[in-house]
Each structure stands twice: as structure tokens, then as C-alpha cells.
Image (tube, rainbow, N blue to C red):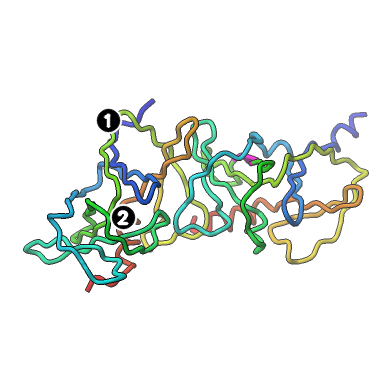
Amino acid sequence: MADNKQYLRIGLLGVDYLLPNNTSYAIEKREQLEINDAPGAFIAAWQVTTAGRTPAYSLDADLNPLPRHAWQRAVFLKAGPQSIGLIADELQLMPSGEVRVEPFTPLGPAPSAAGHLFGGAWVRAGHAPVLVFEPRALAAHLFQLGGAT
Amino acid sequence: MSTAVRDTVHALEVPTDNLPLLLPSACMAEVVALPRLARVPQAPPWLIGVLGWRLRPVPVVSYDMLVGGEGHAPGARARVVVLYPLPGRKPWEFVGILSVSEPQSRIIDGGVAPAALEDSFRYIAAALKFDEHTVGIPDFAALAKVLYPDR
């Protein structure tokens, strides 16, 4: 039985993750953002609003900071009163009903104060599982990278 | 006859790079070839990835790395032993243990001798001597504590 939720597929350097669509998020194109040209910066850009600047981090597939410049879009997560962004190589809203997510408990200590980064996975025959982000934990992971001021 | 049957336990010897593990067959759901795993970012190195098994995600653990040993890429003969959920865990929380080659069937009976083990082999409840080599029986309660420390 397929999952009723929709998911946003986020591609990071060839590895896919899913973000549940019950998360409040916004997708911004590169040209709508203020680009950070500083060499080696892992904040790739800022979303500028009347409320201030929100950083968008550039990460590798293991979610470690990785400065890079060839990207086109970022996804900004709403985490309580704040937002925080992540540069993506690919973004695709998966059609409703296409994805079936099973619960998944990562092992070992949680890497963020908000818990484990993943809470489910989409498993298909012949493919490696695709992990599903826990949005609060992903936001907490991005916040703890720092360097935003 | 009835005593012999009662005292016999079927098990699998799971080869690792250090201490082979002896797992009672009743703990195991299946032994599968090692497919492409999904990496788990920001996880401990001993969690080598996630296996898709019967349309479920199953985390796969390297016992060698869990006890502080060196990790290396599993070879073509590697297998994953899928264990039923550990004590106290949810019914869908299967766990995979990396086996460096095909596990071997063993029968434990009264003729198998206990063995002493160095302290460096953690999460082991007891050791047994088979022929000329020693195997360790995992301490599943201790494993559950290290695999699920937050819960």
C-alpha cells in the first residue's frame, strides 16, 4: 500500500533523500538568492526577506559542509520561528502515492539535539533504500553548522 | 534421546575479521547476499548502511568496527545475517550483522567446551571452543544498549 503523504526528493551529489511534504518548506531558485562568493564558504547563499537573511548551506551526500558553486536551487525549511536552507542538486516533488515509506530507526547516538536525522526509508526492489529526513533534526543539524552570522 | 534433543541448539557461525560470532538459528530471519546499501550520514562507522530487505529498511552493523577494529569494504563473499528485533525493540526493528563470508551451520551440544576470551571482545555473553577455534555468543542485551543508546 502506498503512502498518502507526498515527498520532496532532494538529490545531493548523486544520493537521494526524501523530505515529507507535511513539513513547511519553500524552494528558491539561485537567481532569487543572494550568492555568497567567498572562497571556501559552505553557506552558498542567503534568502533575503524583510525579516532578515536566511542561510542556505552547501553539503555533501554525507551532510558534511562542502563548498561548491554549481547549483541551481535551494530548499528552505521552516523550523519554529526560524528558517534554514539547504542547496540541492536536484529537487522533485514525488507524485502522490508513488512512495511507500517504512519506519526506520538509525542506530547509535542521535547526531543532533533534535534526534536522529532519519525516521523512515523508501525501499524498492533492486534499489538501495532512500532515507527520509526527520525535518526537525535536519534543521537542527543545519543550525549547528554555524557560520551564519 | 529426549535429553539429547533438549540440549541441542542449532546455530550459525558468522565469520568476522576477528572473533567469529555464534548466533542461535532462532534469532535469525534470513541470510542474504550483500546488496548495495544506503549510507546513513552522521552515523557511527560501525553502521555500514541500510539494506532493503523484504521492502523493509534494515540497518547493517559491522561487529568488527563496533568493537573498535578496522573497517574495510566487504568482499564479494560477504553476507548479511538479518536478525529478529533485539529484546525490547519494535517488531519492525530487524538488524543486520555483516558476515565476511557465508555463515556455517553448527550444532551446539554437551560436547562443546566453554572458552576464555580477552576483554577486548565486547558485547559477548560467552565463548565456546569448536575444534581448534573460538566463537563468541553475542550479549543481545548489551548490543541493544549500544545500538539504541537514546531509547
CA separation in Å, label 2 and label 1: 22 Å
Relative image position of residue B17 (x, y in whole percent): 73, 54
Relative image position of residue B139 (x, y in whole percent): 69, 53
Question: Hey, which quadrant is residue A39 in on the image?
Answer: bottom left
A55 to the left or right of A102: left
Is B83 included in the stretch rendered in magenta?
A: yes
Residues drawn in magenta? B80-84
Is A12 included in the stretch rendered in magenta?
A: no
- Give the amino acid type for the residue marked by disc 2 in the picture: Arg
Tell me the crowding category of disc 1: few under 14, some 14 to 19, or many 20 or more residues within 10 angstroms, Cα based: few
Q: Which element carries disc 2, helix, strand or loop?
A: helix
Q: Which element carries disc 1, helix, strand or loop?
A: loop
Question: Hey, which quadrant is residue B107 in on the image?
Answer: top right
Residues B50 and B86: in front is B50
Image mark 2: chain: A
- Give the amino acid type for the residue marked by disc 1 in the picture: Ser
Q: Residue at x 84, y 51 (%)?
A: B128
Relative image position of residue A136 (x, y in whole percent): 31, 55
Tell me the crowding category of disc 2: few under 14, some 14 to 19, or many 20 or more residues within 10 angstroms, Cα based: many
Q: Is residue B83 above or below residue A143?
A: above
B47 to the left or right of A60: right
Residue A96, label in figure: 1
Instruction: Determine which residue is flagged by label 2.
Output: A136
